[in-house]
Every structure is written in C-alpha cells, then in structure tokens.
Amino acid sequence: MNYPGQSSFRQADLIRLKEHLLNMISRELESRPLVAGDRRAIIQDIMLQAYESLRLSLPSTIKDQLFHDIMDDFMGFGPLQPLLNDPEISEVMVNGHESIYIERNGKIQKTNISFDDDQAVIRIIEKIILPLGRRIDPESPTVDARLPDGSRVNAVIPPVAIDGPTLTIRKFQKDKLTIEQLMQLGSLTRGMADFIRVCVVSRLNVIISGGTGSGKTTLLNVLSGFIPPDERIVTIEDAAELKLQQDHVVRLETKPPNSEGKHQVTTRDLVRNSLRMRPDRIIVGEVRGGEALDMLQAMNTGHDGSLTTLHANSPRDTISRLETMCMMSGMDLPIKVLREQIASAIDLVIQQSRLKDGSRKVTSITEVAGMEGETVVMTEIFRFEQTGISKDGKVIGELIPTGIRPLFYPRLEAAGFKLGPEIFGANLADMLGHQGRRR
C-alpha cells in the first residue's frame, strides 16, 4: 500500500509501523472483545497512544490512510475492501501481492492497489476460510470458499502458485437480477424469457452451459426463481452462492478432506444423498465430474425439473462434456448407453456466452431431441446472430427464433401452457425452409 505524502518516511518504515499497530490493536481487542461499533473508537484511541509513545509526528494524510488500512484489515479484507465495496466491480483478481486486477463492466483492468507482501495476502485468505472450517497450506495449496455476502472465492498459494499467492473473488450481486433486467441488458428477448419460464415450470431438465465468467450462475439464479413456491428444492454446490427466494430450500455444500485426507464430502456424495431427501427439484451449482452420471440417473428416475450448469463452449460440446464426466464416475458403460442416458434425461441446453465486448448473452437455446443411431439429436430453438462490431467495439447482432417448435411442446401444453407460434418465429419457418432442424 502506498501512502500519500510519505516523502520523509520510507515505505518500509511505514509497513513496519503498520505491523506494529496491528499487533498492538490485536492484543488489545483480544483482551476485551467488543461489538463492531466499539471497535472503531478503540482502534483510533490505540493508534493515537502509539503515535505519542513512539513520538511520531506523521502528516494527517498518512495517519488517515493508516487508519483506513487498519480498519479494513480488522473489519474487512484489507486493501481489497474498497474493491469489494464498489458495486461496479464484478471480479477481483490478486496475482501476487503487487498485482491486483478487477473486472468492471465486463472489462479487465489493473489497479494501483497492492499488499505489503505475500504474507499479507495469505492472512486475508486465512481470514476468509477460517470461519468455514477450510484449510490452505503447502500440502493443500488450493481452496474454494465464499465471503459472508455469498461472493465466490478461489485461492492458490505456493508451491503451486509460482509467483506468490493468488486470490480470485467473483463478487455476489446483492441485488439479484430479474428476468426483466436481463431483457433490458439485451441478454435475451421477451420470447426467449417466456419460453424458458414455461420450460422450468413444466419441469423440464435444463443445463446452462458456457465459459468462465459468462454468467451461468446468474442465469441459474434467475431460472430458479420460476420454480413454484410449494416445491421442495435441494441445492448442491462447492461453495454455496445460489440465493433462492423460495421458503422450502435445503442448501448442501461440499466439504474438503481434513488434514489427514479423510472425511471429504463430494458433490457426488451430496447428489446421491439428495435422492433420499424427497426433493421436488435438485439444483446442482456446477457438474464437473462423476456426479454427472448420478444426476442423469436421477433425472431419468422421476426427479425431473432439475437444473445445473457446466463449462462448455456450445450445446454440442455440452453433450461431449457430459459423456466425459460420466466416464469419470468409474462405471464402464458403452458410449451408446451413455448417450441414451443423456438424450432421455436432458431436455434443454441454454448456452450463455460472454462476447468480445464484455456483454453476456444467451446465444443459443437448444432442445435435446432424442437419438438417431448413436448420435444425440439437437434442435436449435433460438440463437444469436452476430452481424458486426460497432466503432466503439460493441458486438452488433440479433437474438432470433429459428422457426422450429420443440418436440417437447406437448409437455408444455399438458402443464397448462400454450405459447403462440410467433414465439418460435413461425413466420420464419418458410423462409428458413426448415433447414437446420437436425444438426
């Protein structure tokens, strides 16, 4: 941290002074626990006493900065706290103590903020994970966690992180986005929103696929809001970040192994256990491994209406990724059997993408329409067509229906919904000549 007006004070001296003050304040606060409101005044008094005892005459700018830094250390997360407080910042990335980046409005930029040293970064990491019962050390150098407000945290320390401890925070949006706001942002159209809502209420099994930072979890949160309030929902996540509005929600979170490598609880364990909890809906924050097979089997045995996300660059790639993850389960199933499981379990793949200009859009909504031979048949219902890039770098394009009505449409009608043909672009059908029905 650089201090204003420090010309007569060396940076190293100020760092040592800050460490001294932190130690003094820690001892004082440990001896008499206080509520948050008292701490501010106590910390200020201790600092003033320290300046007097050390006979230090510091400029008011440096005193103010020291006070803010120390308050951030005790009440927040050090130099990162101003970034976490900024509502326009969606992601904070620490690449060692001197290199901190942020994502603002979809664009990544470097900040002028830094930590005093690598140990200061590790202290913040430990402060985050300690209340969650998680650990990080050279033998277990990676950890997933969350902040009290639900923000997602990943940390990696040496020897795995070669250039110093790395911390990535995906900030939780305090004001949960609604489907209306997504439409205003251009992420999807009214027709797409109506179609997705009807699919969720009608208990179709939906996968949201996309790349890192594309907005999968945000969209999953929005979709979960369509689930009727009288249904029992079980959510399964590595680090709990879903914020469902319904009352009847059971939230499950994975548990890493202890220091002896025992007592780990994986996503797969929780998926299996959730089947014994009488769920109406199972929501898996993200499938990454063998739990994919358990989830597909659950979808195929009466637990319809399930929602999940996974990393994939296209709807077709989503099917390939599911195949690969099912193979990680240890079950030696023929590829045709796996594909039949996928085709019968998954109804809809929603592709979420982050475009070159930083905007996030639903770029494809695709039906999983069954099998032809050994191939999973997919039908695109909506898609994003890019037409160019504006002078200011904005992606220009249009979200359009393909003119094709999904084969599962009778299920929507059976659930009491009747969507007008204009939603599917019925007027486009002749123009397209029904091309692209199968791909």
Image (cartoon, grey):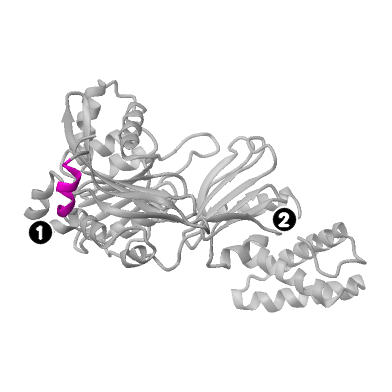
Q: For residue 339, what is the image quadrant?
A: top left
Q: Amino acid at mark 2?
A: Phe
Q: Is residue 427 magenta?
A: yes
Locate the C terminus by quadrant. top left
Q: Residue 68 appears at what percent x and percent y?
A: 71, 71
Nearer to us: label 1 or label 2: 1
Q: Say which residue label 1 marks.
A: 418
Q: Amino acid at mark 1?
A: Lys
N-terminal label among 1 and 2: 2
Q: Residue at x 30, y 24 (%)?
A: 331
Q: Say which residue label 2 marks.
A: 115
- Neighbour class for label 2 at 10 Å: few (<14), some, many (≥20)? some
Is residue 360 in view from this perspective?
Answer: yes
422 lies left or right of 7: left
Label 1, label 2: how far apart the Cα atoms are: 58 Å
The magenta stretch spans which residues?
426-434
Q: Residue at x 34, y 52 (%)?
A: 362
